[in-house]
Image (cartoon, helix red, strand yellow):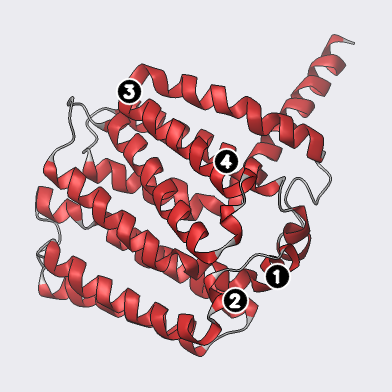
Amino acid sequence: MAVSTLTLLLNVLGQFFWTLVLFTYTDFKTIVIPVTIFASVAAPVRFTGRLFYAIFWTWLHLLQVDVSNQYKSIAEDRVNRPWRPLPGGRISPKSAAIMRWLLVPICILSSVPFGGEVVFSSLSLTALLVAHDEIGLGGHWAGKNIINSFGYLSFELGATQIMNANPQLDHIAVQSLVFNGLVILTTIHSQDFSDVDGDLALGRVTIPIYAPNLSRVFTPFALVAWSIFLGRLWNLGPASHCLLCGVGGAVGWRFFRFRASNDDANTFVAYTVWLLLTHILPAHVRWGVLSF
């Protein structure tokens, strides 16, 4: 009997944690991985314990974001991602709503041990979520992009502060945060190309919906322009700079040339690779690793 009870308990816990993973699964490549890499370079990380806690902090706050977004957008996920917990029936909308608000104090408490800047990052994410989901600013392309860029910046600031062993971030970290925020502001709409049908179902107006042709022209320009600028900003070597520009150009060309939903989803994966490359550029200033 005891063995059966333990097996049942482990199964319930396993299903619960798998549900949490499914909430955040699609954003590991766009949030957890690049934020962790960026913070490791920008801080830079010196202690393994701080590294793992920063990863946990980032994932926990991502969970808050994704639960909040997804219990408000079940109709979209039925179209684009039916395997997610809510359209898949793993959790009810009422339970997800309760979880969404329980995660607010949990995230704040997880930030307290690392000081006021990390708490500020947590509070900023919560405020941005309220603006996006409860107030509805995420339904307009301008509001969505601004909130996404500041939200991304909050993730990176919090994770960098956790990894940072010094009281204050140095000028390399600050400069990295500022320009990463601007990159996200001008390119994060790339994720919306493949979600047009779902966004239309919810009545959202994203940049690809508001300006379908202009966005296809602007995106390649932005990716190449940022690649050129960031390469010069961080004084990359010629081969490294050409690689960054080549990836940015290839991703931009794919967004312009291939416009089916599946193509856009695949191109967005390539975009995350380019974004990841932009996140490691400050490593060259610290350690000279991209001088080739």
The type of residue carrying mark 1 is Leu
In primary-sequence order, the first of circles 3 and 2 is 3
Q: Are marks 4 and 1 in contact (CB under 8 Å)?
A: no
In primary-sequence order, the first of circles 4 and 1 is 4
**Quick one: which residue is furthest to the top in this view?**
2
**Quick one: which residue is furthest to the right in this view?**
1
How far apart are the alpha carbons under marks 2 and 4?
A: 23 Å
At a point 69% along the width and 30% down the height, the residue shown is: 99
In primary-sequence order, the first of circles 2 and 4 is 4
Q: Nearer the viewer, mark 4 or mark 3?
A: 4
How far apart are the alpha carbons under marks 3 and 2?
A: 39 Å
Dot 3 corresponds to which residue?
116
- Label 4 sits on a secondary structure element that is helix
At a point 20% along the width and 66% down the height, the residue shown is: 230
Dot 2 corresponds to which residue?
209
Dot 1 corresponds to which residue?
200
Dot 4 corresponds to which residue?
130
Q: Nearer the viewer, residue 99 or 133?
A: 133
The type of residue carrying mark 3 is Gly
The crowd level at tag 4 (other Cα within 10 Å; few <14, some 14-19, many 20+) is some
Judge whether 224 appears above or below 111 on screen. below
Horizontal and vertical percent position of residue 80: 71, 64
- Label 3 sits on a secondary structure element that is helix
The answer to whether residue 244 is visible is no
Q: Are marks 2 and 1 in contact (CB under 8 Å)?
A: yes
Q: Nearer the viewer, mark 4 or mark 1?
A: 4
Quarter of the image for the N terminus: give it. Answer: top right
In primary-sequence order, the first of circles 2 and 1 is 1
- Label 2 sits on a secondary structure element that is helix
In primary-sequence order, the first of circles 4 and 3 is 3
